[in-house]
Amino acid sequence: MKDNFHALILAGGIGTRLWPKSRRHRPKQFLKIQDEVTLLVRTVERAEAIFDVQNIWILCKPYHLEEVITQLPDIPRTNIIVEPSPKGTAAAVIYGCLLIEEHSPGSTVTVFPSDHIIRPLDEFKKTIEAGMSWASKNPAMVIYGIKPKRPETSYGYIEAGSTIDQCKGHQCMDVTAFHEKPDRKTALAYIASKRFLWNSGMLSFATWIFKKALEMDAFSIWSPLLGLAEKKDLMAKAELTKDIYSGLPEDPFDTAVLEKMARCQPPSGIDAPIKLVVFPCTFDWHDMGVWESYYELSQKDQHGNALLGTAFEMDCNGMLIMSEGPNLVAAIGLSDIVIVFEGDAVLVCPRNQLDKVRDLVEELKNKGYEKYI
């Protein structure tokens, strides 16, 4: 791709929805999940099919730096961005993109989470290249949407409007609204309407448009960080950057940025509104941060049971049972339950309540069980 196209890969998540397999010291992006290499390595391999290696950036937490360096020896050390302090995806994406703009002004950035399984590569490549091309030429942020396969309550949903353009054979649609993590009844209604797409977490935008968007009043919390970026002081004044960064909210990018953009008027200096558009994707996509994706990809018996590792069932249906250690996990007469024995912890949860795993982890932390997280 052109020199001004960059990939920002987010490798700083903890993966609480995939507890107890994903832990703080060993999050999901560093695991080999149904593959010979880790999710992070596979994400970088997909990026290398589109971007020059010097234009691939990895953003991680301070305590994950050594693991990232070990897993990605071909990525230049200067391209591995360490968050000044652990925050949510909003702060991470903004910080990473401001650094890329500081390094390479006029860039178009595509953001990739590092916990996806995507096939086939060729279709993925064509879709991302189309979205990047459109984003580089329009005052817009491009989001990549996935056709829902199930009433998933752990994902955000994009309400798509009319088709406004075509780019390299790919449909470009207006975004009407975002809807965060609905209940099961609402998710079923979304699927039935056929107007909704899962928010994949992947997006493309020109950095100058992104910075303009953040100048709107709704984003005043980010002004100190933008001020440092304007003076090209993000790296030069590392301690000041860290002080400012530590005071930023821990919000996810979708709610802190995209949802607000959908409701705000454009800033001065932009003739046309900053659009939010979605490119529907036809490639096979799985977010491996949720146990339902694990079940979906696993080989199952005639009763829909997926048994992984030292696991056994009798008279069960629709189960995911996993024990990758020496301990046997056996179940009798159960239906649609996830049982995971990993290390020093066991998860037992109905498949239709897996969206509560994140809440469980937070409650464990609050009750003094932090060593198990």
Image (cartoon, grey):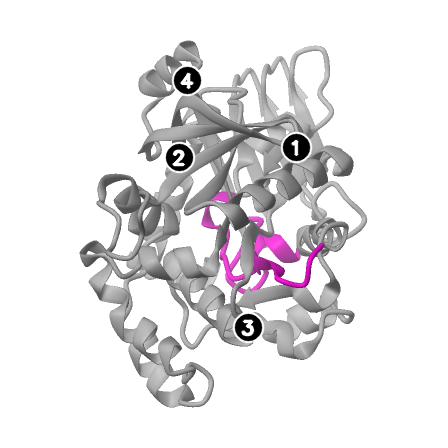
In the rendered image, which residue does mark 1 sit on? 168
Residue 97's spot in the image, x, y percent?
Answer: 48, 64
The amino acid on which the numbered mark 3 sits, given as a three-letter code, is Ile
Q: Secondary structure at mark 1?
A: loop
In the rendered image, which residue does mark 4 sit on? 195
In the rendered image, which residue does mark 3 sit on? 81
Mark 1 touching mark 4, by CB under 8 A?
no
Residue at the outermost right position: 36
Q: Is residue 214 magenta?
A: no
User: Looking at the magenta stretch, what is its main secondary structure?
Assistant: loop
Graded by Cα atoms within 10 Å as few (under 14), some (14 to 19) or many (20 or more), the crowding at tag 4 reads some
Give the mark, 2 or 4, whose residue is nearer the N terminus: 2
Q: Which label is found at residue 156?
A: 2
Graded by Cα atoms within 10 Å as few (under 14), some (14 to 19) or many (20 or more), the crowding at tag 2 reads many
Q: Nearer the viewer, mark 1 or mark 3?
A: 1
Residue drawn at point x = 58 percent, y = 49 percent: 21
Give the mark, 2 or 3, whose residue is nearer the N terminus: 3
Residue 326's spot in the image, x, y percent?
Answer: 72, 47
- In this rendering, the answer to whether 4 lies above or below 357 is below
Residue drawn at point x = 27 percent, y = 75 percent: 224
Look at the image and give the residue range highlighted in magenta.
1-30
Residue drawn at point x = 60 percent, y = 45 percent: 133
Q: Nearer the viewer, mark 2 or mark 4?
A: 4
The amino acid on which the numbered mark 2 sits, given as a three-letter code, is Gly
Q: Nearer the viewer, residue 262 or 193?
A: 262
Image side of residue 52 versus residue 347, left or right? right
Give the mark, 1 or 4, whose residue is nearer the N terminus: 1
Residue 291's spot in the image, x, y percent?
Answer: 54, 35
